[in-house]
Amino acid sequence: MRTYLEFAIKKFQNKMAYRLEFFMGIINTIITIVVYLCIYKALYEGRAEVDGISYAMTATSFVISLGLSNAFWFDEWFIENRVKTGAISNELLKPVNFVFRLLWENIGEGLYRLIFNFIPAVIFACFYTDICAPSSIGNLLVMFVSVALGYLILWSISFIMQVLSFWLFSVWGLVTIKNVVVNILSGTFLPLWFMPNIVKKIIVFTPFESIYFTPIRIYLGEITGMDILPKLALQLMWIGILGIVASVLWSKGVKKLVVQGG
């Protein structure tokens, strides 16, 4: 475990070396927040609520989901590039588990983005518009657990896309489609409260709601008490399902690579 933690620390330290990227990341996030909040404010047209959802709740949902989407960033072409160059064979020979190493490196970069991109943007948003405070300290703490589970869900989906590089020449198209689907069905830019009923019924059978919207609802107090447990269990279920799919594909992909190399 200590070895993989070192991978995360090194990745975090490497990102800190790029100061221009640090400032540009903050500026990009702030501009995105301002633009979308102006759109939401125009849509509310001075009304206190729309379908029972206040502007402050919408703004809070957007700011949190945007921040988490920045932190939940992965190099989606990491495996593809190494498969194309043949460097994947050297990676597999290293005395560490490749999958865990990739996960912890992504966690290290995610923490960097969370601390140095998201938190400054949230501070700005608090002065710029109305942001809801957490419904309770308990819900805030549980939200952090839900965020970690949501991260693992999205990471598993991303890893599955990357592993398909063993069979496809390029996964760019699939990754692009995946990103669009995730942004729409996870409520990144449009909170799921405002989705048509038929779309909500579809989302229930997908892991996307569990990525961002479940932690947000816990933060806002829409899910409290014992009602939180089924939502966390659902997140764990999706991690298990996606983890099994990822493990099977990875095992088959590595064997395919060995056959081609032989």
Image (cartoon, rainbow, N blue to C red):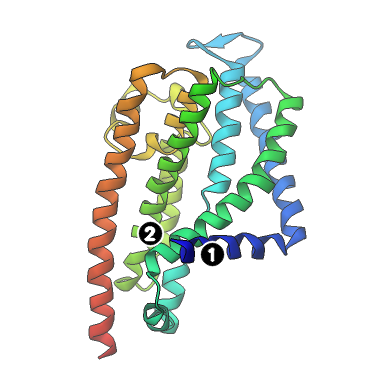
Name which of mark 1 and mark 2 comes first in the sequence.
Answer: 1
Q: Are marks 1 and 2 in contact (CB under 8 Å)?
A: no
- Taking the spot 26% from the left edge, 86% from the top edge, the residue there is 260
Category of crowding for the residue at label 2, using alpha-carbon neighbours closer than 10 angstroms: few (below 14), some (14–19), many (at least 20): many
Looking at the picture, tell me which residue is in the foreground, 11 or 205.
11
- Taking the spot 46% from the left edge, 24% from the top edge, the residue there is 218
Secondary structure beneath label 2: helix
Position of residue 41 measured from the top left corner of the image (x, y, whole percent): 65, 21
Say which residue label 2 marks.
Answer: 159
**Residue 197 in which image quadrant:** top left
- Taking the spot 24% from the left edge, 78% from the top edge, the residue there is 256
Position of residue 119 measured from the top left corner of the image (x, y, whole percent): 67, 39
* Mark 2 residue type: Phe
Position of residue 114 measured from the top left corner of the image (x, y, whole percent): 61, 45
**Residue 234 in which image quadrant:** top left
Q: Report whether 113 appears left or right of 169.
A: right
Looking at the picture, tell me which residue is in the foreground, 101 or 72.
101
- Can residue 74 be seen here? The reply is no
Category of crowding for the residue at label 1, using alpha-carbon neighbours closer than 10 angstroms: few (below 14), some (14–19), many (at least 20): some
What whole-number distance in Å separates the C-alpha atoms at marks 1 and 2?
21 Å
Q: Number of labelled discs?
A: 2
Secondary structure beneath label 1: helix
As drawn, which residue projects farthest toward the bottom? Answer: 262
**Residue 32 in which image quadrant:** top right
* Mark 1 residue type: Glu
Vertical placement of 163 versus 154: above or below?
below
Q: Quadrant of the N terminus?
A: bottom left
Q: Report whether 57 appears left or right of 201.
A: right
Q: Quadrant of the C terminus?
A: bottom left
Say which residue label 1 marks.
Answer: 6
